[in-house]
Amino acid sequence: MPAVRPDFASAESSPHFALDRGVVVRRRANPPGQVMPPHAHPFATLTLVMGGGFSDEYESGTAEGAPLSVAFKPSGHPHATSVRGHGMRSLVIEIGPAIERRLRACGALLHGCGVSTDPLIITRMVRVALTTLDSPGPQGEHAVDQALAALTQRARGPMPAQPKGAAARALKLLELEHAESTGTGSIAAELGLHPTSVTRMFRRSLGCGVMEHLRRLRVRAAAERLANSALPLALVACEAGFADQAHMTRCFRRETGVTPGLYRRLAGGQIPVTVA
C-alpha cells in the first residue's frame, strides 16, 4: 500500500455533536465515485451506512459496506476507500482514545477493521441517528452508550463463519433475486436441494432462516432507495420486493426501529414532490 496520509477529510459533513466522554457524532455525504487514497483516522470510528456503499482496502484484505451495515475502524489503521453507487450517506461516531482502549479489551473484532450487519447493532445506530437529528442531549448520549454496548456484546461472541459452497451460492441467489424470490422453495429448486436442507444450511451459516434473511435484504434495498431517491414509498416497496407499502413499513420498523419515512429523513434523502 502506498504512503499513508494522516487523515482524508474530503466528505461533506454536517455540524457535529460533541458528546461527553470523548465521543463525536457526525453525518457525512460522500459523492459518487469518490476515491480516497491510503489514509488513517486519528480516532476510532463506528459508521452506519444509510445509503450507498463503500469498498475499503487494507494490507490484510478488503471490506465492503452497504446500506444498513456498520463499519468499525480503529484509530491509525491505514486503508484506502472507494465510494460506490450513488454516493454514500452515513452516520459516524468518532470514539476517543480512552473508550477505544476499553473496546479493544473486549474482543478480537475490535482490534481490526470490520463490517457488521448484526440487527442489534443496526437498530442501536439508527437510534443514535434519531436522537441526534436536531440536538444531542441526554437521549443522544444514552443512544451512543447503547450502540457501543451492542458492539461490545457482539465482539465477545464467536466470529461468524464465512459461508461456503452451497450456502454461499444460496446467499448470492437471494442477493440477486430478493425482489422476486419466494423464499425457501425457489432457492431449493435452483440449488437442487430439499427445502429442509436449505433451511438448516441458512440457520447454520447465518443464525436465521431463509425468509428472515430475505426480509433483511429487502429492507436494505428499500433503505438504499429511501436515502438516494425521491421515489414514493409505495414504489420503493414494490421495487424492493414487498407486497405493498404497509408490508414494507412493518418489516422496516422491525429491522431498524423506525418507519421508512422517518429513515428517509434521518438519511437526508429526497422527499417526494406531490403534484395536486
Image: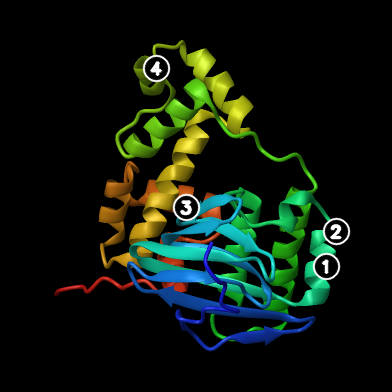
- Report the residue marked by disc 4: 191
Report x, y in % for residue 144: 70, 71
- Report the residue marked by disc 2: 105
Q: Residue at x 47, y 64 (%)?
A: 81
Q: Residues within 10 Å of mark 2 (few under 14, many from 20)?
A: few
In the figure, residue 202 lies in which quadrant?
Answer: top right
In the figure, residue 208 lies in which quadrant?
Answer: top right
Which one is earlier in the sequence, the residue at label 1 or at label 3? 1
Count of marks, rendered view: 4
Of the numbered discs in the image, which one, if any, rests on residue 252? 3
> Label 1 amino acid?
Arg
Which one is earlier in the sequence, the residue at label 4 or at label 1? 1
Which one is earlier in the sequence, the residue at label 2 or at label 3? 2
Q: Which is in the foreground here, disc 2 or disc 4?
A: 2
> Label 2 amino acid?
Ala
Between the residue at mark 1 and the residue at mark 2, the CA separation in whole angstroms equals 6 Å
- Report the residue marked by disc 1: 101
Between the residue at mark 3 and the residue at mark 4, the CA separation in whole angstroms equals 29 Å
Q: Residues within 10 Å of mark 4 (few under 14, many from 20)?
A: some
Mark 2 and mark 3 residues within 8 Å of each other at the beta carbon: no
Mark 2 and mark 4 residues within 8 Å of each other at the beta carbon: no
